[in-house]
Amino acid sequence: MTLVSTSGGGALLKSTDNGVTWAAVDGVATGLPAISSAGVGGLTRTSLSIVTSGGVSVIYLGVGTLPSGTIYVSTDGGTTWANKAGANGFCQSQCWYDMPVYAAPESPTTVFTGGAGSSGSVPSSFMRSTDGATTFQDHMVAVDGNSALHADMHAITSWPGQPNNIG
């Protein structure tokens, strides 16, 4: 069994022996940025959501890199990762503080992000994707179309059996 977990300082850890030993997963070979203790240009914080459908696990990883964040997806147990540019900037300058990523168990291609963005050309603090994190729709734009609620989201979940009923 392959296990993946996030750790303090932004590291992503992987175990292939049921958690007896763990190794950091980062760097160009995997498709992820390198872990950076300075926090500039590398992983500073991560948020993980795993969903299994039809025997295949899809891992969504929110990656905080100063001054922004993006989503990476793995379908091979965390060995390789693909950057999903549609989420670039989703947590803005607060990736160190609030950057949840959530994939609904009943709908593995439905992904939600939170953070502290804005609207317009930059994602807001709450977005949804229905195509596996390829594209996102802003779900917190104000009536004026130019501002968004600053919600400081730290966790997202769905009502059991209702992937679009978010709490």
Image (cartoon, rainbow, N blue to C red):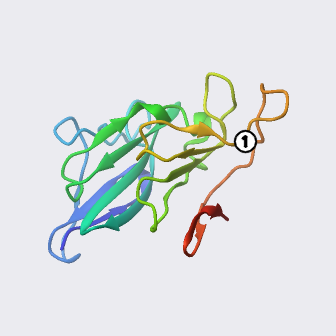
Position of residue 116 measured from the top left corner of the image (x, y, whole percent):
66, 40
Residue at horizontal 66 percent and vertical 53 percent from the top: 153
Crowdedness near tag 1: few (<14), some (14–19) or many (≥20) residues, C-alpha within 10 Å: many
In which quadrant will I find the N terminus?
Answer: bottom left
Secondary element type, mark 1: loop
Q: Quadrant of the C terminus?
A: bottom right
Q: Is 68 positioned to the left or the right of 3 in the image?
A: right
| Farthest-out residue, top | 121
In-image side of 90 versus 133 (left or right): right
Q: How many tags in the picture?
A: 1
Quarter occupied by residue 118: top right
Residue 15 image offset from top left, x and y in percent: 20, 67
Q: Is residue 10 visible?
A: yes
Residue occupying the far right of the picture: 144
Relative to residue 147, is residue 112 depicted above or below? below
Image x and y of residue 99, in percent: 56, 49
Circle 1 is placed at which residue position?
A: 140
Task: Kindly identify the amino acid type of the residue bearing the numbered disc 1.
Answer: Met
Q: Is residue 74 left or right of residue 150?
A: left
64 over 106 or under it: above or below: above
Residue at left offset 78%, top offset 30%: 147
